[in-house]
Image (cartoon, coloured by chain):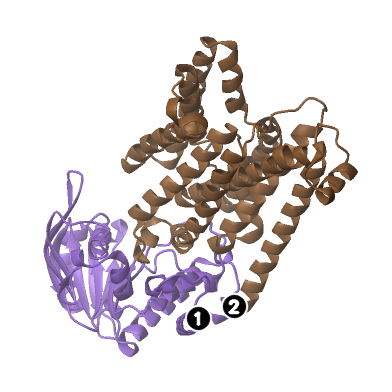
Amino acid sequence: MDKRLVKWVLSVCVLVAILLAVSTLSLLLGPSGVSPGAIVRAILEGKESAAHAILFDIRLPRILLGFAIGGSLSLAGVILQSMFRNPLVEPYTLGISGGAALGVSITTILRLAGPLGIYALPVSGFVGAFCVILFLRVMAANRSVLTIQALLLTGVMISFISSSAVLLIMSISGVEELHDILFWIIGSLGETDWFLVKPALLVSVSGLIFAYFFCFDLNALGLGEEDALHLGVNVERTKRILFILASVLAGLSVSLAGAIGFVGLVVPHFVRMFTGGDHRILLVSAFLSGATFLIFCDCVAKTIIQPVELPVGVVTGLLGGVLFIYTMTRKGSATGGKGA
Amino acid sequence: MLELRSVSCRYGDHLALKEINVRIEDRELVGVIGPNGSGKTTLIRAVTKIMKPVHGKVLLEEQPIDALSFKELARRVAVVGRLGDFDLKIRVEDLVLLGRLPHRQGFALLEKRTDLDIAREAMRLTDILELKDRMVEGLSSGERQLVFIARALAQEPRLLLLDEPTSHLDITHQIRVMDLIKELNREKELTVLVVLHDLNLASQYCDRLLLLDKGVLRKDGAPKDVLTYQIIEEVYKTVVLVRENPVSARPYIFPVSKEDRRRT
């Protein structure tokens, strides 16, 4: 018993240490050519220098946004995968990210921002994500026709449809809007603002805490819905709440940083391999690993071909895509082994 | 303990249970038998509130189950479902501990001492203590079935429902599981409702049998009254021979092959 707790605390400590190390690295590196020495001096000497401004107004919020979004995406992935008992479900493959991107595009082109100001795009992203979630819920409720494979296929189709719609919007929009929309589609942590970072942190961390109230329900759901019912879990209510939580987390992420793919798919899968299926450790591990992964990818994106900055979605896509294929082939061999 | 009052259930247009009236007393060991698709599993689902009857009422300890939440129900009724594929990475002890879920109060990350003790006792009763640190997916079907029974016991239920607990098991494990069920019924005073495909196991172990046929309760009574060759041939559409088991004096069913049928 206590052995388990010790193991959990240890793995959280290790993950936090890696997170801090990657964050420090990302804090010290950047395209602006400020040397690591100057950064250290800026921290020690205080407000006046340009290095200080770069550090606290550009790099730090960017890291914190990466933390919030990486954590949220990964957490949403874990929750969705456990709920559906399928390792391939995530905000991206369910079309939630696509819906959010479409919501953002529509708001941009129709200039619906209005009184919402800086929060307009996050809100419209969330509305877009929520529409997709709602649609999937309705489809999933009619389970006699819709299996999880069909749900995944539907999600991929929604992604295609919304990306086509986004392309349509792009083709009829002006240069200014084009840049805005492109930014959402590829996904980037580049344009950060403390006004957005703070709520993002708040929502993602409260999402994690909230998810913990359902960690036992998620453990039971891992056995299948009927078994979870036998253990007294109100499956329908739990799934509804978790679906909304996942959509809030995914919608938030996509609306702030664009459709960053694969974080919610690859990270939970690998974390599961190390921690096992117990959500008491899985949830926090996935959150921390997702945060670390995204901050690392962002660090690569902003430094690899200086002075050009790559959108982070390109890096997560490349890294994640390779790992995705690896995952698929591994899963294939595993089921093949079981059948034999 | 359990009462079904003219319960009917349907899947779409198909009426899976028709006007079932049954009363099960405390500490009974009741077997449910019947051909495939006769409504045995539906009966279990009606008792666990997974299937909502279109008509009639299910009462648990004189209380309609509609008035109970899933959690309250799970504190009194435990279910051992059919063995399916299992790909979850979970230790045996953790799976058994999940049986404590309905008894959790408030939020605590770790199980209480009493939960651990109850889970341990459940594993001792099912004789799987030495497996407790193994992964469930690596176990044989027989061992896995015992783990799920242990989980059900950890719920500390008053009514235990089992859906074909012996299918896919070899004879050693079949007997081991059935002996365990009987022991729990006799010594732990558990009321048991068990769905069985094997008529001979049902005959040997159950005090009372419910024979379902196309959703209708065809016969309800002691094995010797239910398992007569006329009833079996009529319900199962198969020629059989029924004799008395010399050890237990309960009916034993012999199948008769087509070849033998022609010869006699």
Q: Is residue A57 above or below residue A174?
A: below
> Who is closer to the viewer here, A140 or A52?
A52
> Who is closer to the viewer here, A320 or A60?
A60
x and y percentages locating residue A1 in the rendered image: 59, 78
Badge 1: residue crowd in 10 Å (few <14, some 14–19, many ≥20): some
> Who is closer to the viewer here, A316 or B252?
A316
For marks 1 and 2, give the CA distance. 9 Å
Chain B visual colour = purple
> Which residue is disc 2 drawn over?
A1
- Secondary element at tag 2: loop
Q: As shown in the figure, which amino acid type bears the numbered disc 1?
A: Leu
Q: Which mark is residue A300?
A: none
Q: Which chain is brown?
A: A
x and y percentages locating residue A180 in the rendered image: 58, 22
Q: Quadrant of residue B134?
A: bottom right
- Secondary element at tag 1: helix
x and y percentages locating residue B130 in the rendered image: 58, 80
Q: Quadrant of residue A17?
A: bottom right
Q: Residue furthest front?
A: A48
Determine contact: label 1, label 2, CB under 8 Å. yes
Q: As shown in the figure, which amino acid type bears the numbered disc 2?
A: Met
> Which residue is disc 1 drawn over?
B116
